[in-house]
Amino acid sequence: MSAPVPLLRRDAVEELGTAGLVAVVVGSGIQATELTRGVGVQLLADSLATVFGLGVLIALLGPVSGAHFNPAVALAAWFTSRRTSDGPALRDVAAYVPTQIAAAIAGAVLADAMFDKPLVHFSTHDRSVGHLCLREVVATAGLVRLIFGLARAGRAHLAAVAVASCIGAAYWFTSSTSFANPAVTIGRASTDTFAGIAPASVAVPRCPIGSAPPSVWAWPSCVSAAWPH
């Protein structure tokens, strides 16, 4: 049995993965707006880059830290494993969350720097409409259920493809273009580019955090019915 990965190393991997993810989201958005004026094409380019980038990050870093890159996912992972040793402990989540938030901001700054954009220029894209909260709850609950449904069904090896595909689809079927990640949302507030979100709107993507644990709690019976052991 291999020795557990030290928390410091796992935390560093969460930092790398979250920063990389935000750099992909923001950078591809900037590139798309420089290449075309069509908003639909811009969103297509951004979503495709995110799918590819997220899939690679999960496949590469998942074996080390679990590739959470998301406070809602980390919280749900702790919630489901709080009576076992299969997931992160509460102290791990307490380390992951601030790291993910800081890394998300760093990823946005890196993307802006690569395209010679102003650094830490807060976005003016207002996304505070009330119904967006519902869309984010749906997107995040679906993402969390997918991740832990795969694990419970013994299909965790499909996570890189399945999770990336879920996020890619949510770009298009949610009116918010699916933030589904509070840390990434905060990072996106620091860039006034295609993927940006106004700081005043950041409260909207916090809605899904409360839906994460209940979504996982209600999931085992659904999984058992779909994939009986």
Image: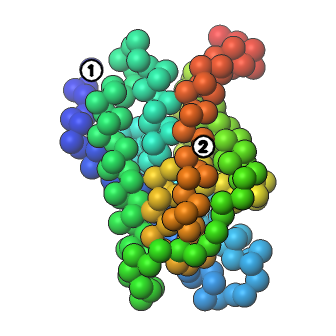
Counting from the top left corner in percent of width and height, residue 22 is at 47, 63
Q: Residue at x 41, y 12 (%)?
A: 83
| Disc 2/disc 1 C-alpha distance (Å) | 39 Å
Q: Tell me how the rendering is colored.
A: rainbow
Label 2 sits on what residue type?
Cys
> Residue 77: x and y, percent?
46, 29
Quadrant into which the C terminus falls: top right
Q: Quadrant of residue 16?
A: bottom left
Whether residue 20 is visible to the viewer of this picture, yes or no, is no
Q: Which residue is mark 2?
A: 207
Amino acid bearing label 1: Met
Q: Secondary structure at mark 1?
A: loop
Q: Secondary structure at mark 2?
A: helix
| Crowdedness near tag 1: few (<14), some (14–19) or many (≥20) residues, C-alpha within 10 Å | few
Residue pointed to by mark 1: 1
For the N terminus, the image quarter is top left
